[in-house]
Image: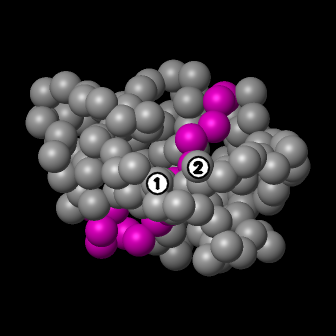
Amino acid sequence: MSTPSPPQTHTGTCHCGHIRFSITSPLPDVVSCDCSICIRRGALIQRIPDADFHPISPSAQSLEDGTHGLIEYRFNTMVARDYICPTCGILGFRRPRLGTGVWAINVRCLEGVEVEKLVVRKVFGSQLSTVGVEGGVTGEGKEEAPKS
């Protein structure tokens, strides 16, 4: 596993700019999942605590009360919530199965981040049951050991 860099503020947007947010976080290794939706989506995910996620558009309050105007997609267990721009179709972030307290950020939406230089860990979300959450650091699937 790589040594995390010090926390920095990173700004993220969808393609058209309708979704805007910032995070205050180091960019350690990120996660690539092999479940059916992640394979199709191609997102690289970093989980961060609520305190480090700063939604700009839509607002934090609108995300909480459901008036955000984004496409909210749920599947499988219907617990995780994916927030997708209604204009350009990009996933900016999601509330994972872990529930409140954690956001999963699409690292590919962060401006100025060279994703090819990040350590990417593989998570086997395809091996999850439809009922529970199993193993893995991410809480979403079995995890492959990082490559040295």
Residue 129 point in image, percent of width and height = 12, 36
Residue 84 point in image, percent of width and height = 47, 59
Magenta span of residues: 37-50
Q: Quadrant of residue 134?
A: top left
Q: Residue at x 81, y 56 (%)?
A: 10
| Circle 2 Cα neighbour tier, 10 Å, few/some/many (<14 / 14–19 / ≥20) | few
Q: Say which of 136 and 33 sits in front.
A: 136
- The amino acid type found where label 2 is placed reads Met
Q: Is residue 60 magenta?
A: no
Q: Is 106 positioned to the left or the right of 95 in the image?
A: right
Residue 15 point in image, percent of width and height = 62, 76
Q: Which residue is mark 1?
A: 146
Q: Residue at x 81, y 50 (%)?
A: 5
Q: Which mark is residue 72?
A: none
Q: Secondary structure at mark 2?
A: loop
Q: Which residue is mark 2?
A: 1
Q: Is 82 positioned to the left or the right of 140 in the image?
A: right
Quote the CA–CA distance across marks 2 and 1: 6 Å
Q: Is residue 40 magenta?
A: yes
Q: Are marks 2 and 1 in contact (CB under 8 Å)?
A: yes
Residue 115 point in image, percent of width and height = 64, 72
Q: Secondary structure at mark 1?
A: loop
- The amino acid type found where label 1 is placed reads Pro
Q: Quadrant of residue 142?
A: top left
Q: Is 146 positioned to the left or the right of 22 in the image?
A: left
